[in-house]
Amino acid sequence: MAGGMNEVDRAKLFPVTRGGIFLAHAAVAPISGPAHEAMNRWAAGAAQGQQEDEEVWRRVRKAREVSARFLGCEWDEVSLLGPTALGLGLVALGLDWKEGDEVIYDPLDYPANVYPWRDLARRGVRPVPLERGLGEKILWSTLLPKITSKTKLVSLATAHYLSGLVPELSVIGPELKARKILLCLDGIQTLGVMPTEWAEADFLAADAHKWMLGPVGAGVLMVRKRVWDRMSPPLLGSWNVVSPDYLAQSTMVVEGGGRRYEPGSLNLPGIEGMRASLELLEQLGRKETSEHVLGLAERIREGARRGGFSIYGQGEEARPITSLLEPTQGWKEVPKKMEAARIRVSWRREHEGRMLLRVSPHRSNTRAEADEFLKVLGSAG
């Protein structure tokens, strides 16, 4: 069983389990059964001319509320925007930068959390890359040498997309706050599977298509009220600028709440799916889900080490993502063996060119499935 569920419930809540073993939730994950049902329900109404009605807007409010509970923020600090790159880009474009300001970023992070900050050089902002080794955890001591009196913002991932390692945010957050430096987070690799409530975070963006088990293109952007006056909406439209009777006004007044950064029509089917999956994960228990997934991930790492494989990323800390380093002889028959066994993993190249086998189980997976993965991995070696 997966986290106390029987097989009937598991197949209903996670339909992907009927067709094999899915261990690639850090990539593009399958949507949950409730997400599928919610999106179908919305589509049925849309086919009858009800894309937007009172019930739909009630569920949009619920989407903000459940997202806020996962983020540890107020519901009206949540903008329903995806993908992650859009949210991070809005922060980069909307913040009150001044020439000479500095932004610290991790050049080894996923491109969505690199390019928006590098691009600020066009506006006179100095992008400052962190210096760390491959697979190395980001500590406060990693950041400190890069901080100056001109540092305005630091942007980090809540977990690295290859190693799964979580930055030392419990120290980094308070230290940045004490220095009045803003903190922006890419939360896509923890939201839905690991605690992602960081009180010191001023901004956080995440798409729904990984651990949230939602559809691609839906997502969240959290902007704390304390920084609304420092981040103007870079995109404007009838949804986030007061426009009575859909008439453009001579004076622009920005809407309050999450609408502040939403310029136009929302991705309603995507939001429906995201909301339903988050509500499912909440019902199953966020703590229980995290413990279950971390247990499976540790089981996979232990088994892989026994089989002679090395883990990408230094340290023994709990993390939902496990990436195995490419052996000297290459991966040989492993991809074919995994496909034949109907086991879905993801393959990602690291910055020195080696191909990683990345494994990322979720609440839907079982110990037996983790063991089957290890069995197939060993037989292909």
Image (cartoon, helix red, strand yellow):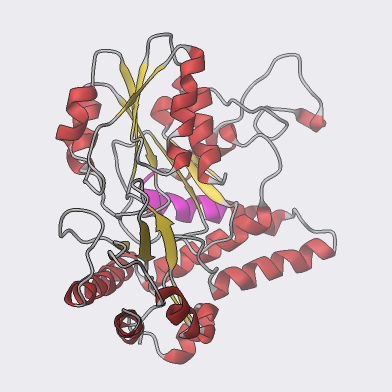
Magenta span covers which residues? 61-73
Image-based side of 378 in relation to 27, left or right? left
Comparing 178 with 26, the one in front is: 26
Q: Is residue 66 magenta?
A: yes
Q: Which residue lies furthest to the right in this view?
A: 48
**Horizontal arrangement in the rendering, residue 154 relative to residue 230 (left or right):** left
Q: Residue visible at 29% across and 23% down?
A: 181
Question: Looking at the figure, which quarter contains the C terminus?
Answer: bottom left
Q: Where in the figure is residue 274, as x and y percent of width and height? A: 55, 59
- Residue 34, above or below 318: below
Image x and y of residue 210, in percent = 47, 60
Q: How many labels does the image show?
A: 0
Q: Is the magenta stretch mostly helix, strand or loop?
A: helix
Residue with the most extreme front position: 329
Compared with 47, 153 (above or below) is above
The percent coordinates of residue 299 (x first, y second) are 23, 75
Nearest the viewer among 130 and 327 is 327
Q: Where is residue 380 in the image (x, y as percent from the top left)?
A: 35, 81
Q: Which of 291 and 335 is in front in this view?
A: 335
Is residue 12 in the magenta section?
Answer: no
Taking the spot 52% from the left edge, 24% from the top edge, the residue there is 94
> Which residue appears farthest toward the top when viewing the image?
99
Image-quadrant location for residue 335:
bottom left
The quadrant the N terminus occupies is bottom left
Q: Is residue 210 shown above or below 203?
A: below
**Residue 350 visible in this rendered orientation of the protein:** yes
